Each structure stands twice: as structure tokens, then as C-alpha cells.
């Protein structure tokens, strides 16, 4: 239907019963984006060579000047209203499949990651939120709290997992009044993404040490990214705080202590480019597994189910008799029994989604300064 303009409002994405698109990336993505090396940040058991940063012996001088006593170090983890007692370290015994000889598995390895304790809003159940690739292919899980007198490990099990969004919920096999949960304040997940240039704190257990590490940075970008664990294109927040192996699943707080994301990957070959999973993606997962359908019935994130072409070419716009006031994208295909099946048709012009204007390059405004691919709105 040439030059027919459609406004698509309030697609029921939260119902979770639509089938997924066969293409995990947005319709306007390029092959150059696919070739970027994005690495997940689970720390494996493979030993890493440690490089000494000590000065030469003739430059050390009096070592007593370099030493610090316990009185000189502030161990207060609740300073400035920030609490990190809800951060946990996740230990995983991993046995990955062997795709060359699929009738057997690879050798047993150990891996570590990070997590944060949250409380479900429905029944007050305490769970540990982490990244799915931290516990992927695991056969045994343990969790360890930070900043407590008894740092014993406790056995944990998977409550729910969504590999699509690289998220997982763990439950510790202890009662709610057990010592593991004492003097603990669950993290409070915020409603929306942090603002650009807002301060964020990445907490976790990266390589280079055994205790809690906290790095600081700012939000540098908000847009859709390809999640390396599933290759699904979802909303992500880019921060310049250090995210290293072992940080995966760790919480990211704002300067007021609110949970604004989960660290999960970093871009190799670039400086200070780490990605965190934002609150809208996390909330969809938590709500789906705790209220709507339960962990076993959760369907994941819906997709638009269409193929689109940008309308930036003047000749193409002239062919479809589009005036300069009409902006949007051309629908080139609609997948059967998917989100937009029966709503959109081939050769339709998609101008709005959920009340948001679609630009000719297939993006919609997100926040004050950012734009994202229109497929983000459907998730």
C-alpha cells in the first residue's frame, strides 16, 4: 500500500507471548558493527601473569614510609549513604559442552563473577541478581557476602535465567533469618536509565585481587547494543568506569546508592568503554519471572517482527509520494505470527511507535540527547 502512513501505538510488548524475530540485530545494523570484539566479563580459572609495579631496589629507600597501618585505612562501607554489603561474589563450577565431540563435555573449570542482593516487590523474597553468562554451563554454585564477620560460602541455585538479556536470579539455600542475610539492605532498582554524565560506581570482584573493588565513572552513552552472550540487540548504557573480568553481574550504583544497572561486557580495543544492563531491561525480567508467568513460563523480550528500510533517499521517497513532512521507515517484510503480524503490512510507512516519532534513519529520541533504533521500543 504505497504512501500509506501507519501509527503504531502501545504494542503489548510486556505480555511476553510473541515469538522472537529471527534476526537478533536491528534492521539498520551494519556488518561493521558485527565485527566488533565485545567480551563478557566472567573470570575463569586460567592463571593470569601478574606484572610487578614495584620500583627498582635503589629507588625504594625506607619502606616504612610506604607502609600503612590499619588505623590509616577507612573500612567504612556505608560512608556518604552508600552501602555495599549487598554485593556478593559468585563462585561457579563450569563444565562447558564440546561441540566437536558433542557426546562429551569439556574439562571442569572454576569461574567467578559478581552479584547483588535484591528483594522482589511482590513477596519480599531475597534473591541475587547477576549475569547469565556467569552461571552458564555451571554444575555447582556458591555465593559469598562481603564486609561480614563470617565470609563463608553458601550453596546457591538458579531461580530464573534469561540468556537473551544476560540476566539471572539466584537463591541461596538458607532461611531468611540465617546469618547470611543479617545486617543486609537489598539494593533498590531505579525506574529508568541514569542520565548522561551522571556519576556511577561499579562494584564487584574483578581480577587482580580477592576483595571488593569499586570503580567510578560517568555515563557516556545510552543506546542499543548487541549483547555478546546472546547477540540480541537490547538497550544498554555505556560507562567509562573500569569493567574487567570478574565484574560481570556486579551492581552499578549512582552517587545516591540506587541500583542503575548490572555490569556485563566491555568493548575490546577501546578505552573506558564498558556496558551495563539498564533498569528497564532488568525490570522486564524480574517482573516476568516473579509476577506474570513465573520462572518456567517466562517468554523473554518481544521483537518487532518486521524488516525495515530507511527513507533517507530522495528517490525512494519520491517513488512512494512522501512529502517532506512525513518521516519514518518503510516496512519491507512482516514475519508471520509475530508482534506486528496483522497490524502492519509490506510497503507500509511506520511513522510512530508508542507515541514516539520515527526518524527517516529508523531511530527514535531517547532521553534529552540520545537516539536509539526503533526496535528498542518494542522490547
Image (tube, rainbow, N blue to C red):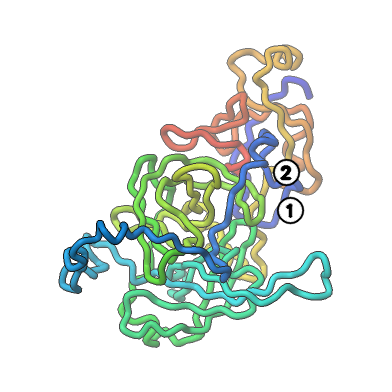
Instruction: Tell me: 298 left or right of 187.
Output: right
Instruction: Tell me: 336 left or right of 276.
Output: right
Q: Which one is nearer the viewer's eye here, 38 or 6?
A: 38
**Identity of the residue furthest to the front in this view:** 58
Where on the picture, by quarter, is residue 57? bottom left
> Mark 2 or 1 closer to N-term?
1
Picture disc at residue 19: 1
**What percent of the width, then of the height, locates residue 34?**
67, 41
**What percent of the width, then of the height, locates residue 204?**
42, 64
- In the displayed structure, 268 sits above or below 358; it is below
Q: Which one is nearer the viewer's eye here, 206 or 147?
A: 206
| Residue at mark 2 to residue at mark 1: CA–CA distance | 8 Å
2 and 1 marks in contact (CB < 8 Å): yes
Where on the picture, by quarter, is residue 374? top right
- In the displayed structure, 55 sits above or below 24; it is below
**What percent of the width, then of the height, locates residue 353?**
59, 36
Amino acid at each position: 500500500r504505497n504512501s500509506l502512513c501507519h501509527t503504531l501505538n502501545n504494542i503489548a510488548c510486556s505480555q511476553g507471548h510473541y515469538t522472537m524475530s529471527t534476526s537478533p540485530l536491528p534492521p539498520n545494523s551494519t556488518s561493521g558493527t558485527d565485527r566488533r570484539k565485545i567480551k563478557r566479563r566472567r573470570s575463569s580459572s586460567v592463571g593470569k601473569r601478574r606484572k610487578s609495579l614495584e620500583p627498582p631496589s635503589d629507588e625504594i629507600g625506607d619502606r616504612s614510609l610506604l607502609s600503612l597501618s590499619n588505623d590509616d585505612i577507612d573500612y567504612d562501607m556505608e560512608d556518604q549513604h552508600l552501602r555495599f554489603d549487598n554485593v556478593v561474589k559468585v563462585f561457579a563450577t563450569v563444565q562447558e559442552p564440546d561441540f566437536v565431540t558433542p557426546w562429551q563435555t569439556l574439562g571442569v573449570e572454576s569461574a567467578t563473577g559478581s552479584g547483588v542482593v535484591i528483594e522482589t516487590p511482590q513477596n519480599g523474597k531475597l534473591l541475587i541478581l547477576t549475569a547469565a553468562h556467569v552461571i552458564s554451563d555451571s554444575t555447582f554454585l556458591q555465593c559469598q557476602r562481603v564486609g561480614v564477620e563470617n565470609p563463608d560460602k553458601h550453596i546457591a541455585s538458579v531461580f530464573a535465567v534469561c540468556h537473551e538479556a544476560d540476566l539471572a536470579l539466584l537463591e541461596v539455600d538458607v532461611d531468611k533469618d540465617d546469618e547470611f542475610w543479617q545486617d543486609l539492605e537489598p539494593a533498590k532498582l531505579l525506574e529508568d536509565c541514569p542520565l548522561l554524565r551522571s556519576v556511577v560506581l561499579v562494584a564487584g570482584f574483578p581480577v587482580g585481587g580477592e576483595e571488593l573493588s569499586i570503580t567510578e565513572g560517568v555515563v557516556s552513552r545510552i543506546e542499543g547494543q548487541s549483547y555478546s552472550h546472546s547477540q540480541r540487540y537490547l538497550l544498554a548504557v555505556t560507562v567509562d568506569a573500569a569493567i574487567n573480568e570478574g565484574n560481570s553481574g556486579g551492581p552499578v550504583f549512582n552517587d545516591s546508592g540506587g541500583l542503575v544497572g548490572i555490569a556485563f561486557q566491555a568493548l575490546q580495543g577501546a578505552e573506558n568503554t564498558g556496558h551495563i544492563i539498564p533498569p528497564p531491561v532488568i525490570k522486564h525480567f524480574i517482573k516476568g519471572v516473579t509476577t506474570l508467568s513465573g520462572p518456567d513460563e517466562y517468554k523473554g523480550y518481544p521483537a518487532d517482527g518486521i524488516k525495515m528500510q530507511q527513507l533517507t533517499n530522495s528517490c525512494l521517497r519520491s517513488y512512494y509520494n512522501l512529502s517532506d513532512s512525513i518521516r519514518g521507515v518503510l516496512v519491507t517484510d512482516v514475519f508471520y505470527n509475530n508482534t506486528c503480524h496483522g497490524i502492519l503490512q509490506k510497503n507500509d510507512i511506520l511513522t510512530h511507535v508508542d507515541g514516539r516519532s520515527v526518524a527517516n534513519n529508523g531511530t527514535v529520541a531517547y532521553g534529552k540527547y540520545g537516539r536509539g533504533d526503533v526496535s528498542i521500543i518494542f522490547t
